Image (cartoon, grey):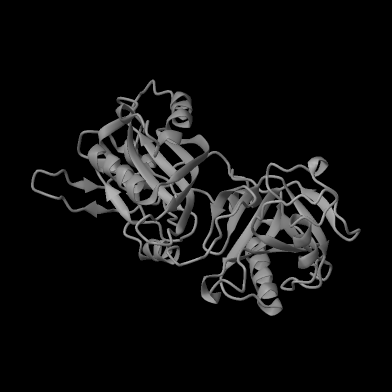
Amino acid sequence: MATSNLSHQISRPFPTACVSIRPPITAANNQKNPSPPLKPHRDHRKLSLKPKSKNHLNWAIKLSLAEQSPPKSTLDLEQLVGFLYEDLPHLFDDKGIDKSAYDERVFFRDPITKHDDLNGYLFNIALLKTLFTPQFYLHWVKPTGPYEITTRWTMVMKFMLLPWKPELVFTGTSVMGVNPENGKFCSHVDFWDSIEKNDYFSFEGLLELFKQLRIYKTPELESPKYQILKKTANYEVRQYDPFVVVETNGDKLSGSTGFNDVAGYIFGKNSTTEKIAMTTPVFTQAIDADLSKVSIQIVLPLDKETNSLPNPNKETVILRKLEGGVAAVIKFSGKPTEDSVREKEKMLRSNIIKDGLKPQPGCLFARYNDPGRTWTFIMRNEVLIWLYDFSLD
């Protein structure tokens, strides 16, 4: 991720302040060292963008905000913050964003895309909508400078042109510059959490996109609901809703001991012989630091509550509601072994501690596929570790 503050000045039609670019502070660093109010930084770089034609304006960085006296303005950033909370959730739906809130010369850039006018900006939105059917989740919006607003978001997309329709996930922040002369947005610069080099053109960003095109076979079955809060280079952070499981004792994380008992419950071996719809994944949970005390779980449909479910026939089988929460998750393919699952848990725990997060003891291992019916290289497996006190601020 970029580490210097950039300020773009364009000869006309809008002033320097409206294309200010401030790299975001990571959530992990912010948790460890709460930041004071943002101040302009005197370090800056000079950058020139070649014109598309003789009539096209030359862009250049000449001054930092620290070296200028901002023009007098009656700009109400809090009003614009409220506007973005209302407007941005429509980014990819039929209503769309209110384009009248943007300058004709709006500057857009992410690690692999750039445009310098409103038509290009709107074209980029339309292209993503056509190719990826994105789902956009806005987490927060806040002022971060005299003429600057930062947003934090998650975008989940399915690439419809590939037969397996891979899911692509990007999280990050957008720094939006405001033209103090007219109160319109005139710059929009994205920073992805999953890469270090966010400057255009980022080969790291392109590689991140291609990595997410790989094949995973995920059954079209109901599974616990979650929202991806953050995607780093090594793991995802998810907010899980509560869900109910049928559970019994297991032997090891990658083992199947006890599976027939919990599967028997949903196939009708219960007090009312009720058959319950199959879901995914099958969880194996270890609740201690040594990963030795293990239970195996099948998730029950989301419309089921423990007080409305039939009782298990076996005393060793129980129903339990998990309250959900925030978990760090690492995803991998292949046939899992005890060594490989424990290695993934160790890797995940190391990465989240390095990033300043606080993991809880134990883990969950999730298996999404029937090993007898799925090719090994497309099997989807995950290791989850619940977190304490996670914040996106």
User: Would residue 352 be visible to someone looking at this image?
Assistant: yes
The relative height of residue 347 versus residue 172 in the rendered view (above or below) is: below
Question: Quick check: 29 left or right of 282?
Answer: left
Locate the N terminus by quadrant: bottom left
**Which residue is pictured at 45% across the width and 56% down the height?**
168
Q: Position of residue 72 (x, y in %)?
A: 35, 24
Q: 99 and 312: which one is in front?
A: 312
Question: Quick check: 359 left or right of 54?
Answer: right
- Give the residue at the far left of this rendering: 54
- Give the residue at the far front of this rendering: 273
Q: 104 and 345: which one is in front?
A: 345
To which quarter of the image does residue 279 belong? bottom right
- Give the residue at the far top of this rendering: 74
**Which residue is pictured at 57% across the width and 66% down the height?**
380
User: Would residue 355 be visible to someone looking at this image?
Assistant: no
The relative height of residue 6 versus residue 344 in the rendered view (above or below) is: above
Q: Position of residue 367 (x, y in %)?
A: 65, 65
Q: Position of residue 59 (x, y in %)?
A: 22, 46
The relative height of residue 340 versus residue 22 in the rendered view (above or below) is: below
Q: How many marks?
A: 0
Q: Position of residue 310 (x, y in %)?
A: 82, 47
Q: 313 and 224: which one is in front?
A: 313
Locate the C terminus by quadrant: top right
**Which residue is pictured at 42% across the width and 58% down the height?**
165
